[in-house]
Amino acid sequence: MNVMNINSVKSFAGIKGRFFSNTKDVYFTEISGVDNEEQLIKQIYDMDYMFMGKKGYIRLNNFQNNISYDDINYYSNLYENNNYSIKYSMDNELKNAYINGINNVKKIFTESTSNVNDTILKNFIIKIMYWSDLYLPKIFETYNINNSYKFVYCGNIKRNEYMFLYLLIFLGVDVLYVDYEKTKNFNIKSDYKPYVINYNNKQKLNIKEFENKIINKDKNIEKPKFEINKNDDINRVKIKNKRELDFEEISKFASKVVMINVLNENGECFKTGSGFFAGKNGIILTNFHVIQCGVSFAIRIENDDNVYITDEIIKYDYTRDMAIIRIEYNTEPLNIYNGENNLVRGQKVAAIGSPLGLFNSVSDGIISGFRNIDDKDFIQFTAPISHGSSGGALFNMYGEVIGIITAGYNEGQNINLAVNYNMINMFVKGFK
């Protein structure tokens, strides 16, 4: 649990626990209080939008407690017969995890509750089984231990509800509890501790219930344009003594730039984009709008006949349009410019991406300006790009990445934008 500490809603939304050697990494984060009301609400809604229309994500403001008399009798009989076969039909793998989880939360509840007796324990387990039948079918519409499942609760909480969050952890579900009013007033004795982010302010927030349905939201990021394709060799090149390279040498860095096929839940490609290796152990940097709404991703690497499938989103930033995904692949990452000298207008640049699905096309141009849009810095450049170039790399003539290709506009001639290297360095810090 909590292989890495998750310190924000955005980080929680982007993390995906790995399943390796019969062990699943899960994340349990608790936000207590409020630092910035507007920012917190925005991050929660951005997370909702990220998972809109996808399976395996639930956000609640309240737990249902209107259990019927018939349900009480049904779960009571199960409990008295030491039987946890709830109404929801689970395969053996999930069922075994569920039984193990119930036994674990029973132990935690008993050790954390004073004056507990058989009646209190029975009522607790009845409530847990009732919630299991309500929420597990929504979380596990399709069950696969390799998938990422997330449960978010925003609002007041009591011990029983908190114990249900623990049950979800034992089922491989990442859990985020946002206690903005600081209502949690009990202690839990357990070796499994959530990562708690404490803020001094406590206040009541008006956070709307989440409905998992598609919402039209215009991002208007890029439109098709023409591209220049050069079929150069792909041998690796390394920079020595910081000399300027020619475009043929720059083109050899295409071996570090990938094509991303974005797949739906049926494994069908519905859009393409680009990315590049920005860290070791298969870390790929791309635009958020490239991976947005994708269930999984098929990655193509130059001079490699394999197609690498992943659904592992390590990190994302919706506002800055950046995301990190990971594949099982090991290569040295591209060098990202450190800003030792200021970029200038007229400076030569090269763009590598896969416009219109044309794998790893190279185009040349210059920096034509620097733009600040919504308090974010972009490089304006003239190297031709098209739809599908997004997420690709913009290089200086030393073979260093100075930007992520992000947008192009049809209304003007070669008016293209790239996310500035400063934002890239901040975003990939810790992954290099």
Image: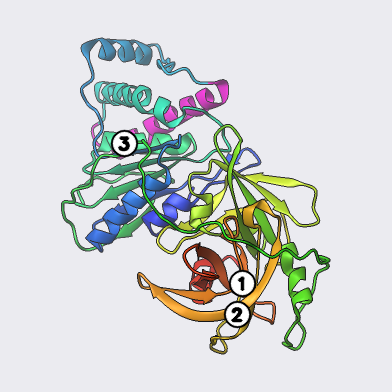
- The quadrant of the rendering that contains the C terminus is bottom right
Check disc 3: other Cα within 10 Å, few if <14, some if 14-19, many if 20+. Answer: few
Judge left or right: residue 386 versus residue 65.
right
Judge left or right: residue 139 versus residue 311.
left
C-alpha span from label 3 to label 2? 46 Å
The residue singled out by tag 3 in the image is: 211
Please provide the residue range marked out in magenta.
Answer: 91-115
**Contact between labelled residues 1 and 2, with CB atoms less than 8 Å apart:** yes
Residue type, mark 3 in image: Glu
**Contact between labelled residues 3 and 1, with CB atoms less than 8 Å apart:** no
The residue singled out by tag 2 in the image is: 366
The residue singled out by tag 1 in the image is: 383
Residue 225 locus on image (x, y percent) = 57, 60
Q: Residue furthest left?
A: 204
Residue 39 locus on image (x, y percent) = 28, 60
Q: Is residue 110 magenta?
A: yes
Asked if residue 193 shows in the view, the reply is no
C-alpha span from label 1 to label 3? 42 Å
Residue 133 locus on image (x, y percent) = 37, 22
Q: Earlier in the sequence, mark 1 or mark 3?
A: 3
